[in-house]
Image: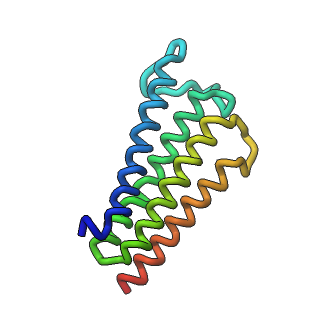
Amino acid sequence: MIESYWWTITGLWLILLTVFIQNFVAAAAHGKAKNAVPGKLDDSLGHESFIFRSHRTFHNSLENLSLFVLPALLSMFVGVDAALLGGLAWTYALARIIHMALYYAIATNKNPSPRSYFFLAGWLATAALYVILAMQLF
């Protein structure tokens, strides 16, 4: 099973590593702030603040993590095509990395912002995963 799902497993590893790195970046940025209180973000911060953007990037990834990772694991257990599943995992992983990089780099309240397109790419990969998993199950 591990050999046939190598691309999926490495894609999932990259997704989890990305969230781990986001956690570190957000904690480091927050920790360097004057009068920083652990676990509390200053309510006056907005997109102009890297502290806000790194915090939101991390929390956005947390909010979406289980929505992709859990059905991907279930898909491996029920025998979804390994190449297709690997492609979805890597699409999601790369979309989330680009979303992160754009969120870190661009301070904007504009919607859609450039990061929105990569959020959408990750969302579409997740939606496709649910459809493919349902087709395998039913």
Q: Quadrant of residue 56?
A: top right
In this rendering, the answer to whether 89 lies above or below 37 is below
Measuring from the top left, give residue 100's x and y in whole percent. Answer: 56, 43
Q: Of residues 123 and 5, which is closer to you in this image?
A: 5
In this rendering, the answer to whether 106 lies above or below 38 is below
Measuring from the top left, give residue 106's x and y in whole percent. Answer: 68, 37
Measuring from the top left, give residue 71's x and y in whole percent. Answer: 38, 66
| x 49%, y 40%: residue | 58
Q: Of residues 18 and 74, which is closer to you in this image?
A: 18
Q: In which quarter of the image is the C terminus?
A: bottom left
Residue sitting farthest toward the right:
110
Q: Quadrant of residue 133?
A: bottom left
| x 46%, y 70%: residue | 129
| x 60%, y 36%: residue | 104
| x 59%, y 47%: residue | 99
Q: In which quarter of the image is the N terminus?
A: bottom left
- Determine whether, in the image, residue 108 is placed left or right of residue 41: right
Residue sitting farthest toward the front:
3
Measuring from the top left, give residue 62's x and y in whole percent. Answer: 44, 47
Q: Of residues 103 and 81, which is closer to you in this image?
A: 81
Residue sitting farthest toward the bottom:
138
Residue sitting farthest toward the top:
34
- Determine whether, in the image, residue 110 is placed left or right of residue 51: right
